Image (cartoon, grey):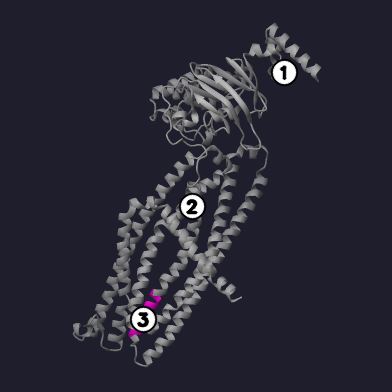
Amino acid sequence: MTGVRVSAGLGPVVATWKEALRFVAILRRFRPFLRPHVRPMALAGAASLGFTLVTLLEPWPLQVIFDGVLLDRPVNLLGLDLKALAGGDLFVLLAGASLAVLILAALRGQLYYAQNVLAAISGLDVVLAIRRQLFHHLQMLSLAFHRRSHSGDLLMRLTGDIVMLREMVVAALITLLSQGLVIVGILAIMASLNLRLTLVAALVVPLLFLILSIFRIRLNAAARRQRRREGRLASTAHEVLGSIHLVQAYTAEKHEDGRFKKMNQRSLRAGARLTRIEAQLNRAVQIAIAAGVCLILWLGTRDVLADRLTPGQLLVFLAYVRGLYRPLRQASKLTQRMAKASACGDRVIEVLDEIPEVADSPDPVILRDVEGRVTLRGVSFGYRDSQPVLRDIDLELTRGEMVALVGPTGSGKTTILSLIIRFFDPQEGAILIDGIPINTVSLKSLRRQISFLPQESVVMGVTIRENIAYGAIGRHGKEPSAEKIAKAARRARAHDFIMQLPDGYETVVGERGGTLSGGQRQRIGIARAMLRKAPILLLDEPTTGLDPVSGTAVLEALDRLVRDRTTLVVAHHLTTVMRADRIVFIEDGRIVEEGSNEELLARGGRYARFFEAEWGALTAQRLPERMRTSLDAAADRERLER
């Protein structure tokens, strides 16, 4: 039973030791970011040392005034008789002591300023370096990671968490250094004045350490909970604001207000719990310190009455006791900040330690001068192992060929595009570009050979010029000239509407292109792809959701874009299908049929039935007689099968 009690009593100490080790591990993790700032941090440390020395000298003028001036007693400091140096004039002694107080305060203030400014600048530089690394790493992580993560929470880690981390990697180091030196110096001087009282004062330190140990565990748990709640709150707000058109269209404002209110209340409760624990810690520390001061005051006064101490020495000793306990009080506040910073550090490291699921091989091949032959051999893939999306896909695209992927929704068409651009890797089979397996190729060099136009073209909240130039910057590493940008826009049928905008090519569009129509965004995306000049083109039904006029403009632009490029297009519209050299019909993750439109219709198989169901009623009158007959025959066979 006694062993259980001992274990329970040692629990907080053991937990604190583990926390200290974790703190050291976090500092070691961020050591590369600290290394470039060793010099300013060393200067901050020197200023901290000077600050410590000045702090240790500050109480002595009080003894001079109290013993030498008020009580007219001899005053010896560092072996010097100060009254003799002042010629026995008490006012000279008072003036000297007062001037010393002023000088020490000025020095203390200047050193404190230097210490904090140097530490703050180093901290900001470290924060910027970590933020850049985290942002770069987030861009390198696979699409699977971003799909399962909440963007609002990632933004919290990129902004608020890193700022809090500064408390750990810089401010904490400087504070621990300065306050540690102050405590050691004060204990040494106190011991020279009265060893017994020093030991009494030191008895409070283990008690404070135990209090800090107990509360640190609770603070860490509460801080992590609060950061998680804040991250979820940010994710909810980001999601709602990003889908504001849907919220307003379905008049769901009240529902979202309620949902946000609940999330906000959870965050508030987590914050309130953290505040209560911080207040409880501060209260416990204040009571422990007050108990120590009371005990020292009691014993010290008895020593003065017994002539073992002078009143001035007791005053100086009490000043040093306050100086000793002040860093300990600051340690309690530092514990609160460090608990939050540790939680934030863990969240940042969690992302930095995330390994991309799709990455370069150890010695990747660099693709250059690509012809554009694309081959899929026995490719199978599933976002979950138990739910395959593609099954044993064999597909060959020759240079300059346009192939349309057709089939029911959810059959795996877009997934094929994602595998070719290597957003994901197949579980089985291989994908080759010009006969080279893409999993042996550098990701950057692979994607520089591909232009990707998604179903809804993404337009960033920058100028039209920057949006169009984006494709060339990513592939060629430099921004194209204004003439090339305008030429690409003309070929994409975008120049005319761009010139009607308030500032033409320098018009800043809304976030995600919200100030442009769908057709305008698609044409900007096409202009971007034209500037990229990649030999392989992947299109995910670029005319979805467009009106006939916009759709026609986009199709005309696409006709220019696909020339001399190997093109794989996910097609839902007949106008897109009819432009393809070859059609591949996919159903349930398998290639069922492939051939030209006429061949597949004449065959009367799955594609023909799909064609009739999707487009037959709208196009039968415009089809040649042979194709209409094939469709009718396919329909008759389907009725007989039923």
- In the picture, the disc for residue 609 is 1
Nearer to us: label 1 or label 2: 1
Q: Is residue 382 magenta?
A: no
Which amino acid is tagged 1?
Answer: Arg
Helix, strand, or loop for circle 1?
Answer: helix
Query: Dots 2 and 3: beta carbons under 8 Å?
Result: no
What residue does disc 3 label? 317
Q: Earlier in the sequence, mark 1 or mark 3?
A: 3
Category of crowding for the residue at label 3, using alpha-carbon neighbours closer than 10 angstroms: few (below 14), some (14–19), many (at least 20): many
Give the magenta part as a residue range: 312-323
Residue 525 seen anywhere in this rendered image of the structure: no
Which amino acid is tagged 2?
Answer: Asp
Which amino acid is tagged 3?
Answer: Phe
In front of the other: 594 or 298: 594
Indicate left or right for 110 with 327 as reference.
left
**Residue 423, position as x, y percentages in the image:** 53, 33
Indicate left or right for 194 with 642 as reference.
left
- Among all residues in the image, which is located at the extreme bottom? 306
Identity of the residue drawn at 55% across and 72% down: 9
Q: Quadrant of residue 465?
A: top left
Locate the N terminus and report the quarter of the image it occupies: bottom right
Identity of the residue drawn at 42% across and 48% down: 130
What residue does disc 2 label? 161
Helix, strand, or loop for circle 2?
Answer: helix
- In the picture, the disc for residue 507 is none
In front of the other: 61 or 99: 61
Helix, strand, or loop for circle 3?
Answer: helix
Identity of the residue drawn at 51% across and 67% down: 14
Q: Earlier in the sequence, mark 1 or mark 2?
A: 2
